[in-house]
Image (cartoon, helix red, strand yellow):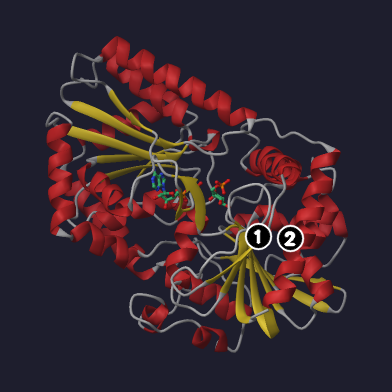
């Protein structure tokens, strides 16, 4: 078995098997922000990515993807049902997102979660070089750091949670809360999106495990585990370069024509998830149409909602409700050839997404709760023309970093309607000033700056940075990216250690 000095462990691999229209099996980029952030970062790095390939049954052997070795972990049908759909996405996911849907608890799911985490830990132990670095990602694998440390105490282990980490009163509902916390403490560094999450974690460790903890350090056995906030980002330069291509600009112009040359286009791009606030947004839009504040001929809404976790009951119900509501709104307010909402559930390639971002006068990103929300950052990066208004939920991790967005509380329907009208009616000067500030921030705080701040905290000597690729367009940029902001310079970011 070939071994790597850097191993990334995530439930999903960056590619996913899917069936092409002609019935052939093809591979495509996996959905979601985790893959979107890590894949461009690792490209051409001699690393191994341990993960699941998206189907049930034996683990397919995959070729390297952009120079990164793929090491697949098999999930059986029962594992999928109980670990992925069950404990990960029907217990932890809703609980970590403010319990906007009711978290469910089943003992069988917990057993599967332990079993699958053990399998990931064993697979990782096989492919990590002696003394190597392992970077475990997200809520599906919270036990892996502890299990891996037991198997391979020589490794340097990092854990990063891409989703929110809930306040103690919610986390305390979990029957196996102590085991989950202890699992994460197997890491040398536990990273979160926001400082509040690190604070919640420290409080829980003190309360549940009775260990000495601050918002930066936790003592366990004879070790110190460092914790901190590292807001994840995107490859800003890559998205900007893509959006600036003449063919993307031309595509954006064509899209506008195809939409009937409206005065204004509102865009939303979401994985179809109840955390994203799609229903609340549709309700606000429908009320604005009913009151005449927004008129179909002037304005169109393009709602991209890519289906997700389709076998989980709460997601099936959500999709049915959204589709019924889109149908109702189009039936009531649309005209022949002029729907009120253009509703699309297809996956798009990056160039098409960039063209959509460029055509959107207002981008509405209004989740009820979101760890980060990279779509908001992609929109800002794509606005190379300096135009475009970002309507952003206060409950997205991004809001702490982009206070120049038009911020709204998506639970407040009147506030949401007012925010949408404010963004639609804002002066080009105001829109331009806000967009300039957000673009400047994102050019500094891109995905490389994120990796640098996390990995240098993990490897204090900073030697790890040198193990990452220096090919153009990848982490080479790390050398040119200014050092990550200090807590004083950026209130959203507080780094562990120091
Ligand atoms: P989450 O991780 O919860 O899905 P994010 O906003 O952080 O939310 O990340 C979503 C990612 O998925 C973004 O990179 C976005 O570009 C991508 N994405 C969303 N919808 C589509 C789609 N229809 N086709 C292709 N990519 C999509
Ligand atoms: C979020 C999670 C990721 C997950 C992604 C897509 O970004 O933080 O871990 O991969 O959603 O969800 P899926 O269930 O399709 O992997």
Q: Which residue is drawn at 73% across and 60% down?
A: 202
Residue 369: image x %, image y %? 54, 41
Would residue 199 appear left or right of 78 to someone viewing this image?
left
- Disc on res. 431: none
Residue 302: image x %, image y %? 29, 33
Would residue 338 appear left or right of 270 to someone viewing this image?
left
Q: Residue at x 63, y 33 (%)?
A: 312
Would residue 308 appear left or right of 207 to someone viewing this image?
left
Read off the residue under disc 2.
202
Q: Can residue 310 be seen in this view?
A: yes
Q: Which residue occupies the foreground of this view, 415 or 378? A: 378
Q: Is mark 2 within 8 Å of ligand 2?
A: no
| Vertical position of residue 152 compared to residue 405: above or below | below
Quarter where residue 222 is shown: bottom right
Q: Is residue 207 visible?
A: no
Q: Split into 4 quadrants, where in the image is the C terminus?
A: bottom right
| Vertical position of residue 108 compared to residue 314: above or below | below
Q: Split into 4 quadrants, where in the image is the N terminus?
A: bottom right
Q: Which residue occupies the foreground of this view, 117 or 268? A: 117
Label 1: element kind: helix
Crowding near the residue tagged with mark 1, few <14, some 14–19, many ≥20 C-alpha atoms within 10 Å: many
Q: Residue at x 76, y 58 (%)?
A: 117
Residue 54: image x %, image y %? 58, 50
Residue that lies at the very extreme toward the top in this rendered image: 332
Read off the residue under disc 1.
198
Q: Which residue occupies the foreground of this view, 212 or 63? A: 63
CB-based contact (under 8 Å), mark 1 and mark 2: yes
| Vertical position of residue 297 compared to residue 149: above or below | above
Quarter where residue 20 is shown: top left
Residue 239: image x %, image y %? 30, 60
Kindly report the distance in space between the C-alpha atoms of the residues bearing marks 1 and 2.
Answer: 6 Å
Label 2: element kind: helix
């Amino acid at each position: 078995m070939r071994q790597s000095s850097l191993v990334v462990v995530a439930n999903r691999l960056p590619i996913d098997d899917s069936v092409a229209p002609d019935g052939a099996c093809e591979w495509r980029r996996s959905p979601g922000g985790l893959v979107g952030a890590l894949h461009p970062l690792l490209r051409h790095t001699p690393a191994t990515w341990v993960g699941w390939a998206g189907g049930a049954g034996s683990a397919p052997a995959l070729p390297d993807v952009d120079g990164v070795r793929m090491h697949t972990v098999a999930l059986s049908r029962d594992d999928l049902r109980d670990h992925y759909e069950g404990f990960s996405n029907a217990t932890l996911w809703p609980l970590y997102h403010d319990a906007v849907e009711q978290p469910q608890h089943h003992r069988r799911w917990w057993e599967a979660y332990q079993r699958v985490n053990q399998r990931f830990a064993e697979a990782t132990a096989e492919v990590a070089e002696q003394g190597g670095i392992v970077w475990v990602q997200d809520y599906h694998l919270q036990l892996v750091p502890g299990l891996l440390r037991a198997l391979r105490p020589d490794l340097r282990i990092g854990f990063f949670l891409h989703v929110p980490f809930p306040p103690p009163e919610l986390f305390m509902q979990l029957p196996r809360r102590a085991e989950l916390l202890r699992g994460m403490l197997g890491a040398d560094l536990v990273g979160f999106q926001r400082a509040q999450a690190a604070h919640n974690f420290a409080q829980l460790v003190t309360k549940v495990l009775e260990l000495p903890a601050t918002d930066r350090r936790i003592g366990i056995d004879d070790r110190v585990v460092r914790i901190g906030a590292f807001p994840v980002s995107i490859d800003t330069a890559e998205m900007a370069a893509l959006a600036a291509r003449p063919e993307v600009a031309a595509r954006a112009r064509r899209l506008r024509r195809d939409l009937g040359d409206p005065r204004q286009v509102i865009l939303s791009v979401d994985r179809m998830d109840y955390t994203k606030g799609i229903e609340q947004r549709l309700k606000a839009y429908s009320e604005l149409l009913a009151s005449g504040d927004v008129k179909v001929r002037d304005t169109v809404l393009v709602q991209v909602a890519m289906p997700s976790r389709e076998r989980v009951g709460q997601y099936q119900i959500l999709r049915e409700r959204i589709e019924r509501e889109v149908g109702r709104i189009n039936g009531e307010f649309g005209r022949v050839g002029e729907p009120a909402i253009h509703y699309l559930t297809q996956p798009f390639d990056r160039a098409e997404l960039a063209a959509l971002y460029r055509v959107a006068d207002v981008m509405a990103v209004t989740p009820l709760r979101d760890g980060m929300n990279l779509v908001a950052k992609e929109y800002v990066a794509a606005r190379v023309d300096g135009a475009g208004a970002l309507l952003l939920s206060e409950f997205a991790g991004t809001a702490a970093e982009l206070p120049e967005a038009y911020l709204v509380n998506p639970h407040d329907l009147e506030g949401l309607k007012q925010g949408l009208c404010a963004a639609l009616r804002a002066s080009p000067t105001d829109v331009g000033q806000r967009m300039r500030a957000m673009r400047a921030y994102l050019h500094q705080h891109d995905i490389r700056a994120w990796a640098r701040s996390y990995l240098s905290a993990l490897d204090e000597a900073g030697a790890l940075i040198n193990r990452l690729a220096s090919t153009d367009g990848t982490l080479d940029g790390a050398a040119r990216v200014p050092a990550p902001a200090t807590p004083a310079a950026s209130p959203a970011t507080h780094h562990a250690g120091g």
